[in-house]
Amino acid sequence: MRTTALSTLFLLPLLISSSAFAIAVPDKAHLMTQGQSEIRVAPDMATLTVMVTALKPESLAAKEEVDTKVAALFSNLASLGVTKKDIDSGNVITRPDYQYGKDQAPPKLLGYQAERQISVRLYDLDKLSETLNTILEQGVQNIQQVSYDRRNADELRQQARVAAIANARTIAEELSLAADRKLGEVYAIEYQPQRQAAPRHHGMMNAKMASSEDRDASYVQNEIEFSDQVQMVFLLN
């Protein structure tokens, strides 16, 4: 597993026209810039989202089977060092399961479906394959998602924001120098928090897939990207 505290910071400069800004501008000489930044780092944690289900003739029996599977899952995850505080367990939901026929035939009740969503945070990516195997061995057939993230994500977002501001100022200094003007004070700043892309993840998994690809201990972990941008208006002296 490759773990990087902070990878290379890429700065992407861009000068944009006033029509692209929803920002106040002065009635004097000024310069508008947009600063951008991007930070890429290796993930150091993963969140596994699984759905525990059961189909029984009665809703109570379906619920009890789901609860039994969840209890066994918790016990086996504990043997891998996963504590209860690293597990989010949703409430059980039960609903009738019907089979609909053709020619407007009345639906046939197949039984009652019970389901419970479980999220497991894993902080040792070397145990990812083993953890997936353990989940599947407990009769959980639906691993919905494996998403990667960083424990210091808030810190990295802040670094990206500060870098975007610095990038906007650097661009302004270069342009004012090229135009033989002196860069003045900041007149206005326009900032809208960037919507961070969801952590990259493996998609739906099931027992058949896990037996071939996902039981392989070698996983390719994608880099996590944190980016931001800011618009700034500087006076020109």
Image (cartoon, rainbow, N blue to C red):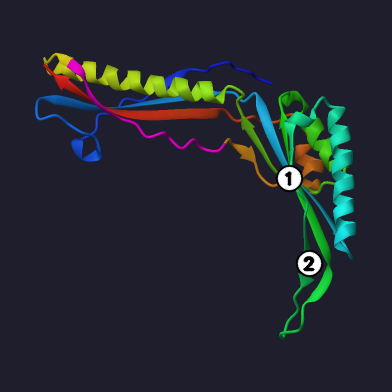
Measured from the top left, where is residue 121 in percent x and y? 71, 31
Instruction: Decide: few, some or many residues near mark 2? Use Cα within 10 Å; few <14, some 14-19, many ≥20.
Output: some
Q: Which residues are magenta?
A: 184-198
Q: Is residue 223 above or below residue 178?
A: below
Q: Is residue 217 visible?
A: no
Is 27 left or right of 169, judged from the image as shown? left
Is 221 left or right of 107, judged from the image as shown? left
Is 224 left or right of 104, judged from the image as shown? left
Measured from the top left, where is residue 185 in percent x and y? 20, 17
Residue in view at x 77 percent, y 49 percent = 116
- Disc sitting over residue 97 in the figure: 2
* Picture mark count: 2
Instruction: Decide: few, some or many residues near mark 1? Use Cα within 10 Å; few <14, some 14-19, many ≥20.
Output: few
Which of label 1 and label 2 is nearer to you?
Answer: 1
Which is more toward the observer, 40 or 78?
Answer: 78
Residue in view at x 58 percent, y 22 percent = 152
Instruction: Say what secondary structure mark 2 lies in.
Output: strand
- Disc sitting over residue 90 in the figure: 1
Residue in view at x 78 percent, y 72 percent = 99
- Can you tell which quarter of the image residue 112 is in? bottom right
Say if the magenta span includes residue 149: no
Q: Are marks 1 and 2 in contact (CB under 8 Å)?
A: no
Which is more toward the observer, 38 or 32?
Answer: 32
Say if the magenta span includes residue 190: yes
Residue in view at x 79 percent, y 31 percent = 84
Measured from the top left, where is residue 140 in percent x and y? 82, 46
